[in-house]
Amino acid sequence: MRSKRLSLFLVVLLVLSIFAIGGCGEGNNNEEPADNGDETATVQRLNMGSGWVTGVYYPLAGAMSRIAHEAMDNISLTVESSGASVVNVKLIGSGDLDLAIVQNDVAYYAYNGLFRDDFKENPVTNMKGLFTLYPEPVQLVASVESGISSPADLAGKRIAVGPLGSGAEVNAMQIIEVYGMELDDFAAVERLEAGEAADYLKDGRVDAAFFTVGIGASVIADLAVTSDIVVVDIDDEKAEELMELEDFYARATIPGDVYNNVPEANTIAVVSMVVAHEDLSEELMYEFVKGIFDNVETIHNAHAIAGKLVTLETALDGMPLDLHPGAERFFEEVGMR
């Protein structure tokens, strides 16, 4: 009889243990206790897609992560290096990213199912805008030796157009088309991330490369120190065609004192922005956006040129998406909506 009672006790204990273990995993998705003395508060662990380590997105995303760590009790932000805009919007669409830095043109195409076949087949309709960051000029960089002084001179040359699926590739293809060329018109077309493209230029393996990056991006600045390069002008007529083609484009000038021995150049620009998955709560995104602009000097210090262009006053310039409710609430609060 005693053995039966013992067996029954062990069965009950086992069942209780199973329930206890199962209960540990509930309501704990990406959350952990806040380290602020409030036992009821939780920290939401978010991830942000950025760009190449050698570009501008990555250090700015890193600055946002520092702001979250130092000034936001309820958010922990992990930065992921990625292939930038097109990859980032797809990862938002699949739910693998919570936040991302992207070009505003790519965000618009992705949301509305335009321009690219993959966007047409799978529009990314689950993302919302948070704020815009800074203008991103399309910088067509060529070796002086190549003799390229206009995009029209690219025919028959070896070029790099950005990684497959990147915003730089989108911009490069639009410029190539406006100048009446196709990919078959080039001796070689390489799809390289920014650092690789710079190395190919330095080593003479390509004659020119497209970069859609902030003015003063280290990948071009470093190249200018070791190589004789130019930033190629996009003439006024073609710039107007591009701006008529897409509302996102604006005229931009690369000052002559930004890169070592590189003269001033006129080009076009898009705007970088931060997007969020629509399922993130209003309160969480309100706290995130407010925290960023309450501590925007951290972003100013993250990049000598692009970082200082991030301001509250320009945070809605070029916004192509509906705002996340949390961002809408913040901008209404500061009188910008």
Image: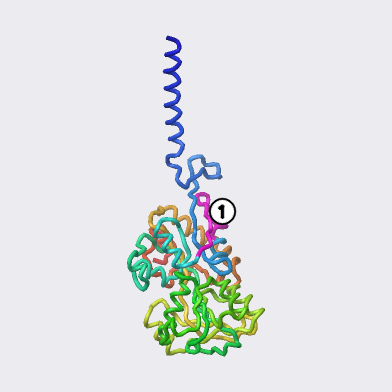
The 10 Å Cα crowd at callout 1, few under 14, some 14 to 19, many 20 or more, is some
Task: Name the residue furthest top.
Answer: 1
**Location of mark 1 (residue):** 69
Q: In the rendered view, does 202 fall on the left or right side of 211? A: right
The percent coordinates of residue 151 (x first, y second) are 49, 86
- Quadrant of the image containing the C terminus: bottom left
The percent coordinates of residue 320 (x first, y second) are 39, 70
* In the rendered image, the vertical position of residue 282 relative to residue 105, given as above or below: above
Foreground of the two, 312 or 65: 65
Q: In the rendered view, does 333 fall on the left or right side of 258? A: left
- Secondary element under disc 1, as helix, strand or loop, is helix
Q: In the rendered view, does 104 fall on the left or right side of 33? A: left
Foreground of the two, 319 or 227: 227
Magenta stretch in the rendered image? 64-82
Amino acid bearing label 1: His
Name which residue lies at 48% across and 53% down: 46
Q: Is residue 70 magenta?
A: yes
The percent coordinates of residue 287 (x first, y second) are 47, 55
Q: In the rendered view, does 268 fall on the left or right side of 255? A: left
* In the rendered image, the vertical position of residue 45 relative to residue 144, given as above or below: above
Name the quadrant containing residue 36.
Answer: top right
Name which residue lies at 40% across and 59% down: 329
The percent coordinates of residue 91 (x first, y second) are 43, 60
Name the quadrant containing residue 90.
Answer: bottom left
Task: Name the residue furthest right.
Answer: 226
- Quadrant of the image containing the N terminus: top left
Name which residue lies at 33% across and 68% down: 120
Foreground of the two, 41 or 171: 171
